[in-house]
């Protein structure tokens, strides 16, 4: 029997009917989502349901952050949405090309398998009768719209956008097959993704360092630190090109700017960061009609990988030294260590792979029990850390969209009393889990604490290798996950890393059960863990 979940037939027309999660009703403003799908065909109703599911899921994610429907997001034209798809296609294609160059198939059989997988994917995307096509396209549609803050409320626009996304995925897949079989005869297969086909835009007189940066900041709402760094870069670029409107800025300007930074002796890493900032604001200018295309797109610099400069993970001896130190072994709480943050932040980093700021800003309510279904279909319950972006006085931020996630609380943390600590903070009325942390530059709660940790680690613990920093805990978690054979995709989802393959954009990711099972396998081999903190 065909799946007709969330579909009701009234008269000759199918309707979409979905309950809003109880805890989101106040934010969304209603208990149910009800709307006519405008079709009497079961097959078409299921296709339109997939699109509505994607829109409802995006609404619920926004509601989790306190964003009400219709606020904080921007309506866009099909041209703008198509531009987002073109950018996504180029980015996915670039990453696929780099991965193939870095890790080519080891033999003919592996190559044949890769080609076959890609051809299966192409078949799904080009066969309108394949039920898997709707899932792949709607997932990518929602991802692109959400990443660009686009509000898709018009049914006709949604359908048009979905078709452009489908064509984009076909384009990426065909390029991938051509690369694998060495048969790529041109830079594109679908004329919609021909860079040379873009129409010219009248030159804009808007100023890059004021008008453009202000517009970008108002729409994208980055942190103040990000606004300041991007404005500074725009001013440096304007000083290089001379005063002129953004519409007159060219690719040659960007290339000579890059050459000047190289001539000044700046490090490749610094140049790469600066070019990325410039590309961000010029890209926004192009998206909003000030330029025909982003003149900085694709201009970067290769950063040599030097093992002596690369951040290193903590080894067992390093971790044993930390946990034998005065904070974890003797119960000391230095003033600048900010109470229990000194004890818990290193352990949370080690057993979650989370970033310092993600943990420093946690609210007590962000650690909660959630239900999930196990491999046998049985309902289970477990503790999770919610890392999401939330607006407001006691809000939280994330690095990227992919950083939003639920992280299972590692069994070691539960054994050490982390849940007891969380409940104590709640009972004491503290909003923030680590309420003694004070904001540093740009309001980041981890900045000042991180400065204390660096001094404590170097002077008190005796770890002096400059390649080892607090972020090394994140590297250590990744190594521990590899050591226990955790699938790469599960590790990435736990750590909030974006996917590395075309297929990673499809589907809904790993289930909570898979994350819980995977987290339980991660162990700190050869490390003597500290005793629970004194109550």
Image (cartoon, rainbow, N blue to C red):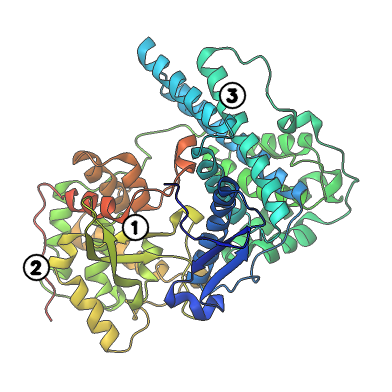
Q: Position of residue 303 (x, y in %)?
A: 50, 34
Q: Is residue 43 above or below residue 457?
A: above
Give whichever of 484, 278 is nearer the camera: 484
Residue 531: mark in rendering: 2
Q: Is residue 333 visible?
A: no
Query: Which residue is outermost to the right?
Result: 202
Q: Residue at x 63, y 52 (%)?
A: 40
Q: CA distance from mark 2 to mark 3?
A: 55 Å
Q: Residue at x 36, y 79 (%)?
A: 432
Q: Residue at x 81, y 35 (%)?
A: 198
Give whichever of 186, 473 is nearer the camera: 186
Q: Position of residue 411 (x, y in %)?
A: 16, 61
* Quadrant position of residue 323: bottom left
Q: CA distance from mark 2 to mark 1?
A: 22 Å
Q: Assign a secondary structure to mark 3.
A: helix
Query: Which residue is outermost to the top?
Result: 108
Q: Residue at x 59, y 30 (%)?
A: 126
CB of mark 2 within 8 Å of CB of mark 3? no
Give whichever of 111, 360 is nearer the camera: 111
Residue at image mark 3: 175
Query: Which image quarter holds the C terminus?
Result: bottom left
Q: Assign a secondary structure to mark 1.
A: loop
Query: Which residue is outermost to the bottom?
Result: 428
Q: CA distance from mark 3 to mark 1?
A: 35 Å
**Badge count:** 3
* Quadrant position of residue 93: top right
Residue at image mark 1: 354
Crowding near the residue tagged with mark 1, few <14, some 14–19, many ≥20 C-alpha atoms within 10 Å: many
Q: Assign a secondary structure to mark 2.
A: loop
Q: 121 left or right of 386?
A: right
In the rendered structure, which disc, 2 or 1, sits on the residue that comes first in sequence? 1
């Amino acid at each position: 029997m065909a799946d007709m979940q969330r579909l009701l037939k009234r008269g000759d027309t199918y309707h979409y009917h979905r309950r809003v999660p109880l805890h989101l009703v106040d934010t969304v403003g209603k208990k149910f989502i009800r709307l006519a799908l405008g079709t009497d065909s079961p097959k078409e109703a299921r296709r339109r349901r997939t699109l509505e599911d994607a829109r409802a899921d995006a609404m619920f994610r926004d509601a989790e952050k306190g964003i009400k429907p219709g606020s904080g997001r921007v309506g866009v034209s099909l041209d703008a949405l198509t531009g987002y798809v073109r950018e996504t296609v180029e980015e996915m294609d670039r990453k696929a090309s780099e991965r193939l160059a870095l890790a080519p198939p080891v033999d003919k059989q592996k190559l044949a398998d890769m080609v076959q997988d890609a051809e299966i994917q192409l078949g799904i995307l080009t066969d309108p009768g394949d039920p898997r096509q709707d899932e792949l396209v709607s997932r990518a549609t929602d991802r692109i719209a959400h990443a660009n803050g686009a509000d898709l409320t018009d049914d006709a626009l949604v359908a048009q956008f979905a078709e452009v996304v489908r064509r984009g995925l076909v384009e990426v897949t065909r390029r991938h097959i051509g690369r694998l079989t060495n048969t790529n005869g041109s830079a594109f297969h679908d004329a919609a993704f021909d860079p040379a086909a873009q129409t010219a835009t009248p030159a804009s007189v808007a100023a890059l360092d004021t008008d453009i940066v202000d517009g970008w900041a108002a729409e994208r709402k980055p942190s103040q630190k990000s606004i300041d760094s991007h404005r500074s870069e725009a001013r440096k670029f304007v000083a290089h090109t001379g005063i002129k409107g953004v519409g007159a800025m060219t690719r040659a300007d960007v290339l000579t700017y890059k050459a000047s930074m190289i001539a000044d002796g700046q490090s490749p890493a610094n140049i790469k960061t600066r070019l990325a900032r410039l590309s961000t604001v010029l890209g926004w200018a192009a998206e909003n009609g000030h330029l025909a295309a982003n003149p900085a797109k694709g201009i970067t610099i290769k950063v040599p990988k030097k093992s002596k400069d690369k951040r290193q993970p903590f080894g067992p001896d390093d971790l044993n030294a930390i946990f034998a130190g005065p904070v974890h072994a003797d119960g000391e709480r230095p003033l600048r260590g900010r109470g229990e943050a000194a004890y818990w932040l290193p352990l949370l980093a080690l057993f979650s792979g989370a970033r310092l700021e993600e943990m420093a800003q946690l609210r007590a309510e962000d650690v909660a029990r959630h239900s999930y279904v196990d491999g046998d279909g049985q309902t289970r319950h477990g503790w999770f850390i919610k890392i999401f972006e939330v607006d407001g006085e006691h809000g939280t931020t994330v690095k990227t969209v992919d950083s939003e996630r639920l992280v299972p609380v590692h069994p070691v943390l539960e054994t050490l009393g982390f849940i007891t600590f969380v409940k104590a903070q709640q009972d004491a009325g503290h909003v923030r889990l680590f309420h003694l942390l004070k904001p540093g530059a740009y309001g980041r709660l981890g900045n000042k604490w991180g400065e204390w940790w660096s001094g404590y680690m170097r002077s008190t613990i005796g770890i002096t290798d400059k390649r080892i920093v607090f972020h090394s805990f994140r590297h250590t978690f990744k190594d521990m996950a590899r050591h226990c054979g955790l699938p790469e995709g599960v590790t990435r989802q736990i750590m909030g890393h974006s996917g590395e393959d075309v297929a990673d954009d499809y589907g809904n990711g790993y289930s909570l059960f898979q994350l819980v099972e995977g987290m339980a396998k991660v162990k700190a081999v050869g490390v003597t863990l500290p005793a629970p903190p004194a109550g």
